[in-house]
Amino acid sequence: FQAEDGIRDLVRSRGLGDVYKRQNLLERISKLGLILGGFFIILGTLLLVGNVFGRFLSFSIPGSYELFELMMVIPVGFALLYTALKKGHVIVELIISRFPMRVALVLEIINCLASFAAWILVAYASLQMVRETGWLEQSDILDLPVAPFRVLFFICLIFFSITYLADMAESFRRLIKK
């Protein structure tokens, strides 16, 4: 959900996500990730429901919560990317819409730059966790390797950050054009 925020050019934008039509690869990756993420959400839900019902029958599935936590990296990481590509992230439209177009564009550029910097730091921290713990770290109960999930999340965060750069470039282009 996002209403038109007044910053985007109605003639060029025509709604959500058109800025990213040139980013076909990212869109394909995000859609594939969403399908994969949906599969893991269903699988995780079945796992947790089976565990809850199993407890009524005096048995539980060992490591079900641990497995669920690892599986959720996939839908969360790709949902961030998809949301950014579709411009579904939260924008403070109430405040920005009150400014003249040039000021609003400058504020959008600043927001994109700050968001890019913040998410790159999060991505860097997740990569550092892999470096510090190495590829040998395993989950507590099931002994599953944790590093592949962290690397996948790192990749999703890099793609997510790139969308902010694209937004910033588009806003900058429009600012120069005005």
Image (tube, helix red, strand yellow):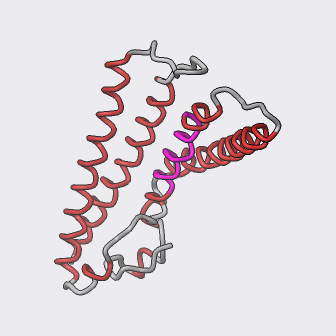
Residue in the foreground of this view, choosing between 113 and 50 = 50
The vertical placement of 23 against 154, above or below, is below
Which residues, given as a range, are shown in magenta?
70-82
Q: Residue at x 57, y 31 (%)?
A: 66
The vertical placement of 14 against 134, above or below, is below
| Magenta span includes 74 | yes
Lateral position of residue 12 relative to residue 33, left or right: left
Q: Main secondary structure of the magenta part?
A: helix
Quarter assignment of residue 5:
bottom left
For the C terminus, which image quadrant?
A: bottom left
| Magenta span includes 81 | yes
Q: Residue at x 46, y 23 (%)?
A: 147
Position in image of residue 29 (x %, y %) = 55, 44
Quarter assignment of residue 74:
top right
Q: Residue at x 50, y 30 (%)?
A: 149
Residue in the foreground of this view, choosing between 170 and 56 = 56
Count of picture labels? 0
Q: Residue at x 52, y 39 (%)?
A: 73
Position in image of residue 41 (x %, y %) = 65, 46
Position in image of residue 140 (x %, y %) = 52, 21
What is the residue that sits farthest to the right in this orientation? 57
